[in-house]
Image (cartoon, rainbow, N blue to C red):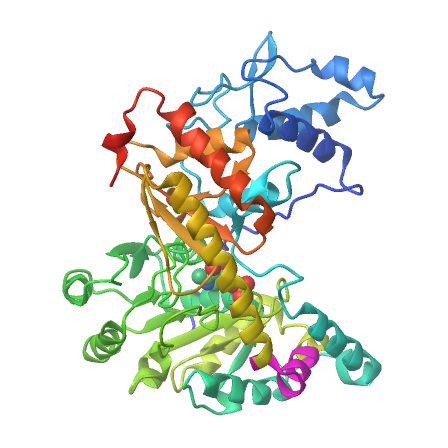
Amino acid sequence: MARKRQNRPRANAAAETGDNAPIYARIRDEFAAKIAAGKLKDGARLPTVRQLAKERSINPMTVARAYRELAERGFIIARAGSGSFVSRPGRAPANGRAPAADDLTLDPGGISSRLFELARAPGVIAFTGNYPSVEMSDAAAFAQCLQDSLSRGAAEYFRYDPPAGREELREALLPFLAQHGITTRADNLMVTSGGQQGMDIVARHLLARGDRVILEQPAYFGAINVVRAAGAVPIPLRFGANGFDLDEVAEAIRKHSPRLIIINPTFQNPTGHSVPLNQRRGLVALAHESGVPILEDDPGPELRFRGVALPPLRALPGGDEVVYYTRGFGKTFIPGVRLGFLLPPRGDLNACLEIKATTDLQSPALLQGALADYLRRTDWLGYLRRLCAGYGARQEKLYAILTGALSSYGHLSLPDGGLNLWLELPGEINAREVYFNAVRRGVAFAVADSFSFRPERPSALRIAFGLTDPKDYEEGASRLAHVLRNVVSPERSLSSAVV
Ligand SMILES: Cc1ncc(COP(=O)(O)O)c(C=O)c1O
């Protein structure tokens, strides 16, 4: 029986910059860009709220809001009575609101908004997008399907549908799933608003406040969010280049009696690592023995550049009894499409549909019709081959540049696919400190603590290259190397930093 939960994950705020953005957002971004580019130096004083408001003939409240947001994002500090100043790295703000490098934990709820903003801030080379750019993705083919669907007429798409989603889409998903070794029927599937909603539905279905959940560490912040929103307690499962340790899972099950295991087994976000086949089999076996189900979050297994494809846990023998499989189409096919699906274990669909109906009744019919069309009519396998060739070449290029520029500072891994690289820094370097200095220098990425549910000193960076122009790789790497060399650790000996 589904248990409804009141608390919901925080919504992501999209960046507001652009000509149509509100004035406060334009002022905020104008100053952020100047600070990031070094045009406004650390310690420089900003015009007072009154001065700037007068100069631009705008309301002082507008300027105050822009300054408040700059402070919240760590670009400036406000000192009562003396004004606003570009903040020096690592210094705490007088009003306690702006993040200081040493004491800020980038909460997972806030990190996605921050990454959006950074990805669009002028002058910043952003290694923050782990989904394909519009040019690289199949957005054009999808747009055509959307137009065709529209021309089929209003009667078809402008009406309410059942929460499970349109049958034409659930049918069209079957060959897609078969490609991944998953055989099922259309009436076992439900359409969701992206993989994120699939995860949320499963968490709300299974978890009550205080329940334990085994969750890989580090983990995708959207998974952390759903666990937090359910009031559940995460039990960390160490996750690295060789996957995880099955004995550790068995021990955690014995010790904590968890209600759920959450895993993103292929090209994991953030590390890019994948779980080897024997561990996949072992985990499904453990789920059977213990009765603890698995939530498999699998947003883009197709983005493989090397090596042999690994089957999803759901496709393994017995997977259909213990695995909730969820994914969206935004990470590999059509960025921003907000469509995905959830395939619950046998017999569990109705409880999940109840939650979907409670949340949003259904996902938009027109988009569903277009996606069904896309899966039926386009050569999406051909598209995937092109996508993998394009991004595989980009990954190799970026990896070569970054290893050249950064190898003395840490260990960079080269996953077999996905759009993230993971740079592990020596323990004495605080990645948060690197982050704030790097943003001021005009290069952005995500820090390990965005992928952690424990307050800890982060020592790794996620460098995502889905949206970054390859022409910027060299410059981005050199800005990051500069930060590591000169800003964070001028006195540290480089040789001692090699891992
Ligand atoms: C590992 C992982 N799972 C799920 C999602 C959510 O994907 P969707 O856009 O399909 O909701 C993301 C998005 O970043 C992700 O990285």
Is 182 contained in the magenta span?
A: no
**Left or right: 443 as drawn, with respect to 321:** right
> In this rendering, would 428 be left or right of 227?
left
The quarter of the displayed image where residue 29 is located: top right
64 up-or-down from 390: above or below = above
Residue at point 38%, 50% (across, down): 422
- Magenta span: predominant SS is helix
Please state the horizontal and vertical placement of residue 116, each as a whole percent of the image: 59, 47
Quarter holding the N terminus is bottom left
Q: Does the stretch in magenta take in 373? A: yes
Comparing 268 with 59, the one in front is 268
* Residue 58 visible here: yes
Residue 164 found in image quarter: bottom right
Is residue 212 something that shows in the picture?
Answer: no
**From the viewer's perspective, is 464 left or right of 310?**
right
Residue nearer the viewer, 473 or 145: 473
Q: Quadrant of the C terminus?
A: top left
Q: Image quarter for residue 340? A: bottom right
366 and 163: which is toward the camera: 366
Residue 431, image x, y percentages = 37, 36
Q: What span is in magenta?
A: 369-381
| 410 lies above or below 191 | above
Residue 74 versus residue 189: which sits nearer the camera? 74
**Residue sitting at x 68%, y 68%:** 139
| Residue at left offset 23%, top offset 72% | 279
Count of marks overlaid on the render: 0
Q: Is residue 487 above or below residue 104?
A: above
Q: Is residue 208 above or below residue 376?
A: above
Q: Please state the horizontal and vertical placement of residue 472, each as a whole percent of the image.
A: 58, 44
Q: Which residue appears farthest toward the top when viewing the image?
A: 81
Q: Position of residue 127 (x, y in %)?
A: 52, 47
